[in-house]
Amino acid sequence: MTTDEAKVEGGGRKKTVILIVGLLLGEAVALAVVFMMFATEPQVARAGIEDLTPAELELERIQEIEVVNDKMPNAKRGVTYLYDARIYVQVKQRNAARMEQELEQFGNEIKAEIVGIFRTSDPRVFTEPRLETLQRRLEMMFHDRMGTVDGGEEPIVEKVVIVLGPGYRVAN
């Protein structure tokens, strides 16, 4: 191969690389333009809090309702521990009467479900800093039991709050 042929071959590669880079940049610019043409501002689906009247704001306030204040057993690993537990549900003021009625009517049944969750929980969940697993299980139980506001998306129970003391070993 002569030096003239080597120069032509090397120049051909350089032109090919420049052509490919140019095509990629052109494609990127074209995609950016298309995205900008079809991009829209997200629409706000709900009314802002500033649009509510004072009476409506009062109904949106969160209220905590005590569900359980008792000692809860856990014997999952063959050793029984008692945990001093306080469990609250957070509901909006407008749903508080419904929740209190449910607790009055089915209080023992709800407590039995909660005790069942405590008894069947792995002891490691009681050592979690924020008790996320236990909280999630209780929230699922309340969501299944209470449902949603007017059959929509918003759950009656906003959140379950667990205040848990240390577990004390009980002789079997």
Image (spheres, rainbow, N blue to C red):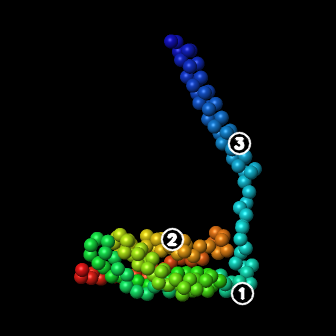
Q: Could you say where residue 92 lies in the image, as x and y percent from the top left?
A: 61, 81
Give the CA separation, mark 1 to mark 3: 52 Å
| Residue located at (72% from left, 46% from top) | 34
Q: Could you say where residue 129 lies in the image, as x and y percent from the top left?
A: 40, 74
Residue occupied by mark 2: 140
Residue occupied by mark 1: 55
| Quarter holding residue 51 | bottom right
N-terminal-most mark, 1 or 2: 1
Q: Which mark is residue 156?
A: none
> Hey, what amino acid is under mark 1?
Ala
Q: Please say if 51 is above or below 33.
A: below
The one nearer the camera, 158 or 7, is 158
Give the CA separation, mark 3 to mark 2: 48 Å
| Residue located at (34% from left, 76% from top) | 74
Q: Could you say where residue 3 lies in the image, as x and y percent from the top left?
A: 53, 15
Give the CA separation, mark 1 to mark 2: 30 Å
Mark 3 crowdedness (10 Å alpha carbons): few <14, some 14-19, many ≥20: few
Contact? badges 1 and 3 (CB < 8 Å) = no
> Hey, what amino acid is under mark 3?
Ala
Mark 1 crowdedness (10 Å alpha carbons): few <14, some 14-19, many ≥20: few
Residue occupied by mark 3: 30
The one nearer the camera, 38 or 78, is 78
| Residue located at (69% from left, 44% from top) | 31
Q: Could you say where residue 40 lies in the image, as x and y percent from the top left?
A: 74, 57
